[in-house]
Amino acid sequence: MSSQPLVSRLTQSWINSETNTRIDSMSCNWRALIIAVSRVTAEDMMNVFEVNSVAPLMLTKALLPLLKVSAAKRKTSIINMSSGLGSISRDIPPNPLFKIYPYRTSKAALNMITKCLSVDLKPYNISVISINPGHLKTDMGGPAAQLDVSTDDVLGKCIRWDGSITPW
């Protein structure tokens, strides 16, 4: 199923609202299935690519008019949630869990989209970056991850990639 109709409906609803006249910051965070090469299919690759790469770009494109309005008056940012696993130059350990083709390639594509947008939107005073939050204890990250974000002692707080809390 394509994310484009959903993105279109959501953004048109936002843009058509009388109270929503600008967007100062936008964060894109997407999650998708992890599959090893022995089981990966073209459909898996396309589905994960659409979620992690295409959807953030299409959302940015759809909301660009509001982002430009904001950028004319104040600092405006687009923040994409990437992963260290999207790095092309980073070594891949011999662990098969790190050879997750759909996820890694989609995050590498997101990083390139981020770079392209940063160049294209710079004249409009819109900053575009990708952030790597680190290895999180989630369904996807697993129990061996360094940072647990589901406990009550971190809810509602600003958590750094290393697990420390940034004071408000």
Image (spheres, grey):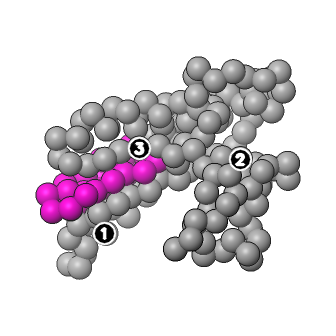
For residue 135, the mark is 2
Q: Residue at x 72, y 52 (%)?
A: 136
Q: Residue at x 58, y 22 (%)?
A: 88
User: Rounded to the nearest whole Å, what is the CA distance between mark 1 and mark 2?
Assistant: 33 Å
Q: In which quadrant of the rendered view does residue 107 lie?
A: top right
Task: Give 135 or 15, whichever is nearer the viewer.
Answer: 135
Q: Residue at x 56, y 71 (%)?
A: 167
> Which mark is nearer the camera, 1 or 2?
2
Which residue in the protein does label 1 denote? 14
Task: Give 44 or 144, whichever is nearer the viewer.
Answer: 144
Q: Counting residues from the N terminus, which is met first, the one under dot 2 or under dot 3? A: 3
> Which mark is nearer the camera, 1 or 3?
3
Residue stretch rendered in magenta on the structure: 56-80
Q: Secondary structure at mark 1?
A: helix
Q: Position of residue 89 (x, y in %)?
A: 59, 20
Q: Position of residue 140 (x, y in %)?
A: 74, 49
User: Does the rendering let one see residue 51?
Assistant: no
Horizontally, is 32 left or right of 55 in the view?
A: right
For residue 143, the mark is none
Horizontally, is 94 left or right of 111 in the view?
A: right
Q: Position of residue 137 (x, y in %)?
A: 77, 55
Residue 79 is inside the magenta segment: yes
Q: Counting residues from the N terminus, which is met first, the one under dot 1 or under dot 2? A: 1
Residue 166 is inside the magenta segment: no
Q: In which quadrant of the rendered view does residue 24 lie?
A: bottom left
Which residue in the protein does label 3 denote? 129
Give the amino acid type for the residue marked by disc 3 in the picture: Ile
Give the amino acid type for the residue marked by disc 1 in the picture: Trp
Q: Secondary structure at mark 3?
A: strand
User: Rounded to the nearest whole Å, what is the CA distance between mark 1 and mark 3?
Assistant: 23 Å
Q: Residue at x 61, y 57 (%)?
A: 160
Of all residues, the one furthest to the left in this rendering is: 72
